[in-house]
Amino acid sequence: MVPKNLYYTKDHEWAQIDGEFATIGITDHAQRSLSEVTFVELPSAGKQVKSHDVLAAVESSKAASDVYSPLAGEITEVNDVLSSQPELVNQDCYESGWICKIKISQPAGVKNLLNADAYEEYLKTI
């Protein structure tokens, strides 16, 4: 499942761009690879991140994985619900399982992300 309205990274993060803001989470491929998510280490609101900085960590019964920021910016909101309901990442990674929102500081960085078609093609190679 690769929604067409999102941008993607080769590290399996997604970003939904809405003006100068982006909502960020992990892809369906990532959550399936991790299996049952048991804990999400959320970032702090107000933190500045660069593209490819570690943004969060997701732990499961199988593994732990860092989540990297697809864009540079300031974290404006975190999905606190994941602290008590990490399984939302598995149940609905593109809606209720989002990780954080950032105010994008370098809009040109979007051109470095994959569109849905390019991400689907990338998935065929791994």
Image: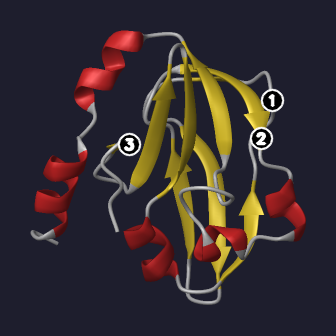
Q: Determine the secondary structure under disc 2.
A: strand
Q: Residue furthest right?
A: 84
Residue, x 78% and y 48% (percent of image)? 79
Secondary structure of the residue carrying tag 1 is loop
* Residue 106 drawn at (x, y percent): 43, 10
Q: Amino acid at mark 3?
A: Leu
Kindly identify which residue carries mark 1. Answer: 45
Please determine whether, in this image, residue 114 is positioned above or below residue 2.
above
Q: From this viewpoint, which residue is outermost toward the front?
A: 4
What is the CA distance from the residue labelled 2 to the residue labelled 1? 7 Å
User: Would residue 29 be found to the left or right of residue 73 on screen?
Assistant: left
* The image quarter in which residue 96 lies: bottom right
User: From mark 1 to mark 3, how far is it between C-alphas?
Assistant: 22 Å
Please name the amino acid that badge 2 sits on: Val
Residue contact between numbered discs 2 and 1, judged by CB atoms under 8 Å: yes
Q: Please, what secondary structure does the residue beneath circle 3 have?
A: loop
Identify the disc placed on residue 6.
3
Residue receiving disc 2: 78
Q: Position of residue 30 (x, y in %)?
A: 43, 69
Q: Is residue 115 above or below residue 1?
A: above
- Viewed as shown, does residue 92 lie left or right of 83? left
Q: Earlier in the sequence, mark 1 or mark 3?
A: 3
- Cα distance in 3D space between marks 2 and 3: 19 Å
- Residue appearing at x 43%, y 69% in the figure: 28
Q: Nearer the viewer, residue 117 or 25?
A: 117
Marks 3 and 1: in contact by CB < 8 Å? Answer: no
Give the quarter of the figure containing the N terminus.
bottom left
